[in-house]
């Protein structure tokens, strides 16, 4: 058995074990008075922006770009997505607006990192800091209020009802994005070029493929997926937007990337783990008999505690591309 086949078998085994564990945890939650299906629905909603952002960043980092500005992209696309939904009078176009805005931010990040040779981590931090100042300003410019905007009911994009649970179309897209990314990266010439751009960009250049174009493509794609996740939060999940709506989810998405070792399916699994932590915190906070026992503020800490545990376990054990974070200089 080849190393590649062996690694795929291990990854599939991990995915199966996590899914089984999720089912067991939800069942145990029911024994303590939690509604298992409600926990699952909340978990899938919480998973969605994390999955989109982390899968996009996996593709980004496979090509050698490190964008830690996911928090800023989620925040900006959430606010502009709501503004777009109100401007067009359509929630789906609001989601599309968020996707486009994320792609534009990814494009700018790519230009600075690829052609400007900017330090990628610093550039990502710059995106996050810019978002912190830009969003309060946009709240005042667009709505004339400093803090919160309730989305008009007709613009909210609801989940789809199935015989078992309610599931959102963006959640389906998030899962599909991980599956498509897995297929592209492992089974197509484009995937080979993306991985070569991160591992051996010089060899890719010699083969006649423009490294800069591959990296710019992944920067835009990663930003667009993250942007869709950002717009989803107010339009398909919360029904409102506040200037702190991202609440650290961009950094949790980065934890998913670290956990996955740049494998899209494992990034999806990691997002599900963190989503489950968020789903449990939501269910505990509203379940009579349970919410009185467990302090509310401790419940809100659950997703972040899970992040620290996962990163502590995974950090240093994953291999990333050799040229990750390094600008390519053509000889």
Image (cartoon, helix red, strand yellow):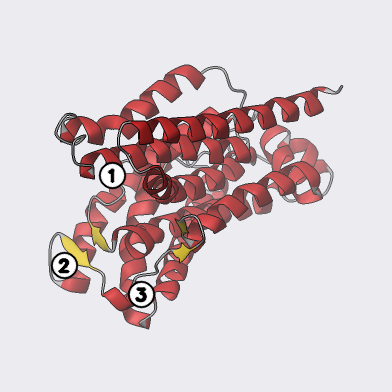
Q: Residues within 10 Å of mark 3 (few under 14, many from 20)?
A: many
Identified at 43% across, 36% down, the residue is: 26
Q: Is residue 313 above or below residue 235?
A: above
Q: Secondary structure at mark 2?
A: helix
Q: Which residue is mark 2?
A: 140
Among the 4 quarters of the image, the one containing residue 9 = top right
Q: Is residue 210 left or right of residue 27?
A: right
Identified at 44% across, 40% down, the residue is: 253
Q: Is residue 107 above or below residue 278?
A: below
Q: Are marks 1 and 3 in contact (CB under 8 Å)?
A: no
Could you say which is closer to the camera, residue 254 or residue 211? 254
Q: Which residue is mark 3?
A: 85
Q: Is residue 131 above or below residue 235?
A: above
Q: Are marks 2 and 3 in contact (CB under 8 Å)?
A: no
Q: Secondary structure at mark 1?
A: loop
Front: mark 1 or 2: 1
Whole-Å distance between the Cαs marked 1 and 3? 22 Å
Residue 247 circle label: 1
Q: Is residue 40 above or below residue 81?
A: above
Of callouts 1 and 2, which one flags the residue occurring earlier in the amino acid sequence? 2
Identified at 56% across, 31% down, the residue is: 20
Q: Position of residue 212 (x, y in %)?
A: 65, 50
Q: Secondary structure at mark 3?
A: helix
Q: Quick one: quadrant of the C terminus?
A: top right
Among the 4 quarters of the image, the one containing residue 126 = top left
């Amino acid at each position: 058995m080849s190393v590649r086949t062996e690694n795929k078998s291990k990854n599939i085994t991990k995915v199966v074990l996590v899914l089984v564990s999720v089912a067991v945890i939800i069942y145990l939650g029911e024994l303590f008075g939690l509604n298992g299906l409600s926990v699952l629905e909340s978990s899938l909603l919480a998973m969605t922006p994390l999955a989109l952002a982390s899968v996009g960043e996996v593709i980004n980092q496979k090509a050698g770009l490190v964008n830690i500005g996911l928090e800023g992209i989620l925040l900006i696309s959430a606010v502009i997505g709501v503004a777009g939904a109100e401007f067009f009078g359509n929630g789906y176009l609001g989601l599309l607006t968020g996707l486009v805005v994320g792609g534009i931010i990814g494009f700018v990040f790519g230009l600075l990192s690829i052609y400007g040779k900017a330090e990628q981590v610093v550039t990502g931090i710059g995106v996050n800091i810019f978002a912190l100042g830009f969003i309060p300003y946009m709240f005042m410019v667009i709505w004339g209020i400093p803090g919160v905007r309730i989305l008009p009911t007709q613009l909210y994009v609801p989940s789809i009802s199935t015989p078992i649970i309610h599931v959102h179309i963006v959640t389906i897209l998030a899962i599909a994005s991980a599956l498509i990314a897995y297929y592209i990266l492992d089974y197509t010439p484009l995937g080979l070029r993306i991985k070569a751009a991160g591992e051996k960009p010089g060899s890719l250049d010699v083969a006649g493929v423009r490294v800069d174009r591959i990296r710019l493509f992944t920067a835009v794609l990663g930003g667009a997926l993250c942007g869709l996740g950002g717009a989803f939060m107010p339009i398909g999940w919360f029904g409102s937007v506040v200037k702190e709506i991202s609440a650290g989810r961009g950094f949790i998405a980065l934890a998913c990337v670290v956990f996955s070792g740049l494998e899209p399916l494992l990034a999806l699994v990691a997002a599900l783990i963190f989503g489950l932590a968020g789903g449990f915190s939501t269910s505990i906070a509203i379940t009579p008999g349970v919410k009185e026992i467990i302090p509310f503020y401790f419940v809100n800490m659950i997703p972040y505690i899970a992040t620290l545990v996962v990163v502590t376990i995974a950090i240093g054990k994953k291999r990333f591309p050799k040229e990750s974070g390094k600008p390519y200089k053509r000889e």
